[in-house]
Image (cartoon, grey):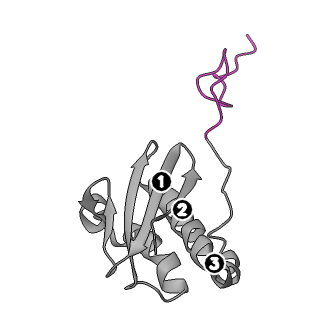
């Protein structure tokens, strides 16, 4: 098997994932994913697509991710891993789609408008 690559996006984060045959190592920006994401519930987001199709120990995952915060990065990586697994085997599509790992979450931060302190918040109104 050659290297399979895929891209995942979430908020301002973009993750490029490269899957190769291996023993289950996940590297994020050159570090082990447990060092890059110290929080256990964020680590689970990365493991979810692999454990859903039960191939956690079969593939090595190399990730380049940038932009956004740690939660957006983790969800971008999750989407990219799911897309790469579907490229490997089309049978993985239905269990991954059932858990919504292949759906792009398009919610992004709304831009700030002029005359307001934030996107929608207004300054205190004074009638007189």
Residue corresponding to mark 1: 16
Residue corresponding to mark 3: 96
The answer to which of marks 1 and 3 sits earlier in the sequence is 1
The range drawn in magenta is 109-128
Left or right of 40? Residue 12 is right
Please state the horizontal and vertical placement of residue 54, each as a whole percent of the image: 49, 89
Residue plotted at (39% across, 58% down): 63
Left or right of 120? Residue 57 is left
The numbered dot on residue 80 is 2
The numbered dot on residue 52 is none
Judging depth in this view, the residue of 31 and 62 nearest the camera is 62
Left or right of 121? Residue 50 is left
Please state the horizontal and vertical placement of residue 64, each as a whole percent of the image: 39, 52
Q: Secondary structure at mark 3?
A: helix
Q: Residues within 10 Å of mark 3 (few under 14, many from 20)?
A: many
The answer to which of marks 1 and 2 sits earlier in the sequence is 1
**Label 1 with label 2: CB-CB less than 8 Å:** yes
- Does the magenta stretch mainly form a helix, a strand or a loop? loop
| Cα distance between the residues tagged 1 and 3 | 18 Å
């Amino acid at each position: 098997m050659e290297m399979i690559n895929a891209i995942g996006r979430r908020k301002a984060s973009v993750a490029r994932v490269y899957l190769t045959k291996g023993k289950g190592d996940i590297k994020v920006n050159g570090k082990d994913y447990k060092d890059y994401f110290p929080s256990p519930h964020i680590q689970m987001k990365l493991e979810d697509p692999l454990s859903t199709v039960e191939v956690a120990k079969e593939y090595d995952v190399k990730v380049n991710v940038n932009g956004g915060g740690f939660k957006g990065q983790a969800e971008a990586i999750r989407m990219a891993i799911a897309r790469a697994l579907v490229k490997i085997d089309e049978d993985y599509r239905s269990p991954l789609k059932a858990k919504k790992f292949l759906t792009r979450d398009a919610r992004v931060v709304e831009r700030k408008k002029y005359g307001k302190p934030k996107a929608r918040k207004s300054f205190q109104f004074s009638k007189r």
